[in-house]
Image (tube, rainbow, N blue to C red):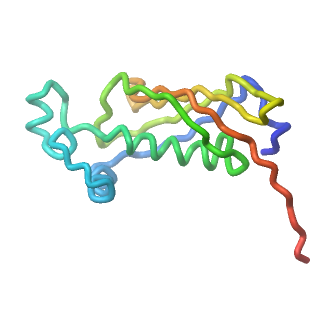
Amino acid sequence: MTNLEIFEGLEARQTFEVTGDLLDSFIQLSGDSSRLHIDDKFAINQGFDSRIVHGALLLSLVSQFVGLTLPGPKGLWLGFTTSFPNPCYAPCGITVHGVVSLVSIATNSIQQDISVTDDIDRVVLQATSRHKLLTVIEVDNG
């Protein structure tokens, strides 16, 4: 996708599977072993359906989406604001949906609105993100 192909209203979606194994791997990687993430009984006693998926795990999937899909490899993620309106439980499928809401030619950047929904259409993450569009020069080494 070239910078000229990015326009306000452009949207993309990507789906992911969030499994118990992925959650356990993230716990090992992050070191965040809060009882809400590892103990079903504790989470249920706190009013949740079961242990909950880390918001940072969801953000890592959003990172994959913005790095490879929209805006993709020609974008640099500058920042974001985010909220987690509902808990996410594993196992589930999630869909990351991004819509370009602003294109700035002056700063060569975009803003996009991102929502992440689970497989029962509950919004588990909402974000607004900002991205610089990079100029990529193709070099022919042939």
Residue 25 versus residue 54 in the image, above or below: below
Image spot of residue 51 (x, y percent): 20, 39
> In the rendered view, does 83 fall on the left or right side of 97?
left
| Residue at far bottom of view | 142
Residue 49 versus residue 14 in the image, above or below: above
Image spot of residue 20 (x, y percent): 27, 49
Q: Residue 31's image quarter?
A: bottom left
> In the rendered view, does 137 fall on the left or right side of 97?
right
Front residue of 54 and 134: 134
Front residue of 94 and 58: 58
Who's the residue at 38% across and 45% down the image?
57
Who's the residue at 81% across and 49% down the image?
135
Q: Residue 128's image quarter?
A: top right
The quadrant the N terminus occupies is top right
Who's the residue at 46% across and 46% down the image?
60
> In the rendered view, does 94 fall on the left or right side of 98?
left
Residue 135 versus residue 102 in the image, above or below: below
Image spot of residue 101 (x, y percent): 68, 23
Who's the residue at 82% across and 37% down the image?
5
Q: How many marks?
A: 0
